[in-house]
Image (tube, helix red, strand yellow):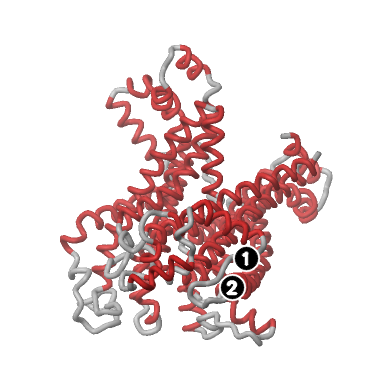
């Protein structure tokens, strides 16, 4: 399986990508462009953002104007610049943590389904137990346990997302693996005496790639919500970080006088998540897979 | 047969809950670092910390502390709050009642909205109304609940003055006053739950409407509404029950955020507040309670699915 995929020459692969894009729905294409824009803003934002995200000095909660596009926040900082800088934050944290969770959870889940027996039983029981603590409650507990020294650090947030996502992804990957291990090519690989790692990487991963990709999309679509919810509750990014959830919580008191200071980060967050979800739906449709989003 | 299966699941749920209690205890009490300093803060004096350690019995070994904590939990004794010095049980009781009220309210809104929109989407599949519902639900599941709550406050409390922005409840409030006070958080929770269920129920309904017995009924001349309500809906409801149970589990995390947005004095807000002030016994109790409800909701979903679908009973 893996060998045929690798043997495809470069021009045909490019044609494959083009065919893939052609089958993208219109909404998925628009969303993909929006995501590219977010990526561009994250990469180049600091070069052209009009103010530093931390620069105070203007009138607090000033309305939108040409000098301050989205007005100013509770400390007189430029909301537009803070939203731009925040993009970098949320994209980096969401994608890194989800990717890490996919690698860890996917590898453990596939290997567990392949090995079977008591190892599989034990791992799955452990993951089921972690999953039976509500996602947000577990995240809060982990952050509380980490203590004040780590509060708000990117590392802690990435680890927290890893902790809540990896068991869920592992459970899903294991279900896929249990179905795949009955196939002939796995039996053959086993008979050849290949190691577990080799079978997982060369036989299971290529065949589970579609499911894992869709799962990645669904999780990546929820990660910004989780991270900003933690920021909103005061357990995520700490002031003066330009994190969107934290900005919403700081400026909420002035929703009457300076609605833009809340609506700008809220809109940026919503559009990002909608685009992530639309692209995931588009990819899933091309791959012929259904997307199940559970609350 | 089925009773034995249910008993097995129940035993498994109790076992899970026991492990969860150990996890929760581990997270709050046993992690490295000086717990006394973590709870009291850097500014605390050595004497304060010593007093704290004595009160929390930190000199005793971990398994001993865990055993006495779990023993207390079985008797309904979660210890005393570090902040108010009242028993945790009495602290939690009124918050739990408030959360129950809010959850029931949200569920009462959720059921009709889900049924109506999913049926509409399935009946008019591919038509503008179906697309509209599909877009609305996708947007709905992309908007974080704290953003939705804030937007509802902006629209309905600030601009239209239809409902209070903060859900502050007084003990003497009547039923309808409380409904009015909690309408915005209830709607927020309802939307957050309904968007998933509508998508799922609509897809199931479409599958059932395409099935042969439904086509047979239509060919026999059964009126359209009767086909939908008597033949299709009951058969599509099984998987939707499952998502409803999942929604119940969402609700437990959801109330944490939504209650904070609306300053509603429920379990979720209590969990956030007690983590902020590091009131360890209250955090432990609230987290365990949340996990317990979560596990029970999943158990209920399994049992309901078994009752609805006899094929599941054999495994």
Q: Residue at x 46, y 62 (%)?
A: B143
Q: Is residue B79 left or right of residue A8?
A: right
Dot 1 corresponds to which residue? B77
Residue B198 visible in the current orientation? no
Residue under disc 1 on the same chain as residue under disc 2? yes
Say which chain tag 2 marks: B
Residue A103 drawn at (x, y percent):
38, 38
Image point 38% across, 69% down: which residue?
A: B49
- Do the CB atoms of the residues marked 1 and 2 lie less than 8 Å apart? yes
Image quadrant where one finds the C terminus of chain B: top right
| Upstream in sequence: badge 1 or badge 2 | 1
Q: Quadrant of the N terminus of chain B?
A: top right
Q: Quadrant of residue A60?
A: bottom left
Report helix, strand or loop for mark 1: loop
User: Which numbered tag is attached to residue A177?
Assistant: none
Identify residue for label 2.
Answer: B87
Any part of residue B101 in sight: yes
Q: CA distance from mark 1 to mark 2?
A: 8 Å
Please give the name of the residue rendered at 49% of the width and 19% of the height, measured from the top-left corner: A186
Q: Position of residue B5 (x, y in %)?
A: 75, 41
**B107 w.r.t. A213: above or below:** below
Please tell me in which quadrant of the rendered image residue B95 appears: bottom right
Q: Please indicate whether residue B242 sits to the left or right of residue A21 in the image.
A: right
As displayed, is residue B55 above or below residue B17? below
In the foreground, A22 or A199: A199
Q: Label 2's element?
A: loop
Image coords of residue B197 (percent x, y): 61, 55
Q: Chain of mark 1?
A: B
């Amino acid at each position: 399986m893996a060998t045929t995929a690798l043997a495809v020459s470069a021009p045909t692969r490019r044609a494959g990508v083009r065919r893939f894009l052609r089958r993208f729905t219109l909404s998925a294409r628009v969303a993909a462009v929006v995501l590219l824009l977010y990526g561009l803003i994250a990469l180049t934002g600091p070069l052209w953002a009009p103010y530093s995200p931390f620069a105070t000095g203007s009138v607090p909660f000033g309305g939108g104007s040409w000098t301050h596009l989205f007005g100013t926040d509770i400390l007189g900082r430029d909301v537009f610049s803070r939203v731009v800088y925040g993009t970098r934050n949320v994209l980096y944290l969401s994608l890194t943590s989800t990717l890490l969770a996919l690698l860890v959870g996917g590898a453990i889940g596939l290997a567990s389904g392949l090995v079977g027996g008591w190892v599989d039983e034990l791992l799955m029981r452990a993951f089921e137990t972690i999953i039976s603590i509500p996602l947000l409650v577990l995240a809060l507990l982990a952050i509380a346990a980490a203590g004040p020294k780590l509060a708000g650090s990117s590392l802690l947030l990435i680890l927290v997302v890893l902790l809540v996502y990896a068991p869920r992804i592992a459970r899903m990957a294991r279900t896929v693996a249990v179905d795949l291990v009955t196939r002939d090519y796995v039996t053959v690989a086993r008979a050849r005496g290949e190691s577990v790692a080799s079978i997982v990487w060369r036989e299971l991963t290529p065949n589970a790639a579609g499911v894992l990709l869709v799962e990645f999309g669904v999780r990546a679509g929820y990660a910004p919500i989780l991270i900003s919810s933690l920021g909103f509750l005061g357990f995520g990014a700490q002031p003066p970080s330009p994190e969107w959830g934290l900005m919403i919580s700081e400026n909420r008191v002035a929703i009457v006088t300076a609605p833009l200071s809340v609506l700008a980060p809220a809109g940026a967050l919503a559009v990002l998540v909608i685009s992530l979800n639309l692209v995931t739906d588009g990819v899933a449709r091309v791959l012929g897979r259904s997307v199940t989003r559970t609350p | 047969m089925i009773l034995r299966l249910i008993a097995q699941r129940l035993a498994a749920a109790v076992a899970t809950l026991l492990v969860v209690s150990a996890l929760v205890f581990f997270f709050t009490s046993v992690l490295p670092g000086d717990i006394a300093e973590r709870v009291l803060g850097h500014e605390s004096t050595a004497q304060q910390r010593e007093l704290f350690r004595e009160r929390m019995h930190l000199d005793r070994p971990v398994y001993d502390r865990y055993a006495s904590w779990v023993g207390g939990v079985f008797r309904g004794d979660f210890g005393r709050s570090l902040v108010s010095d009242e028993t945790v049980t009495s602290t939690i009781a009124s918050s739990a009642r408030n959360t129950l009220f809010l959850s029931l309210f949200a569920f009462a809104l959720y059921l009709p909205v889900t049924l109506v929109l999913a049926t509409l989407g399935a009946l008019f599949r591919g038509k503008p109304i179906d697309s509209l519902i599909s877009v609305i639900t996708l947007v709905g599941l992309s908007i974080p609940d704290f953003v939705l709550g804030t937007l509802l406050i902006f629209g309905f409390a600030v601009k239209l003055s239809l409902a209070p922005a903060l859900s502050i409840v007084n003990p003497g409030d009547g039923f309808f006053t409380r409904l009015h006070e909690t309408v915005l958080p209830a709607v927020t929770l309802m939307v957050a739950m309904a968007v998933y269920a509508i998508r799922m129920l609509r897809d199931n309904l479409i599958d059932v409407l395409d099935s042969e017995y439904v086509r047979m009924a239509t060919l026999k001349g059964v009126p359209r509404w009767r086909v939908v309500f008597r033949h299709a809906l009951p058969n599509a409801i099984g998987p939707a029950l499952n998502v409803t149970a999942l929604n119940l589990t969402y609700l437990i995390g959801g109330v944490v955020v939504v209650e904070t947005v609306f300053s509603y004095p429920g379990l979720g807000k209590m969990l956030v507040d007690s983590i902020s002030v590091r009131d360890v016994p209250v955090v432990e109790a609230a987290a365990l309670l949340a996990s317990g409800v979560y596990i029970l909701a999943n158990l209920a979903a399994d049992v309901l699915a078994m009752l609805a679908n006899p094929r599941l009973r054999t495994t």
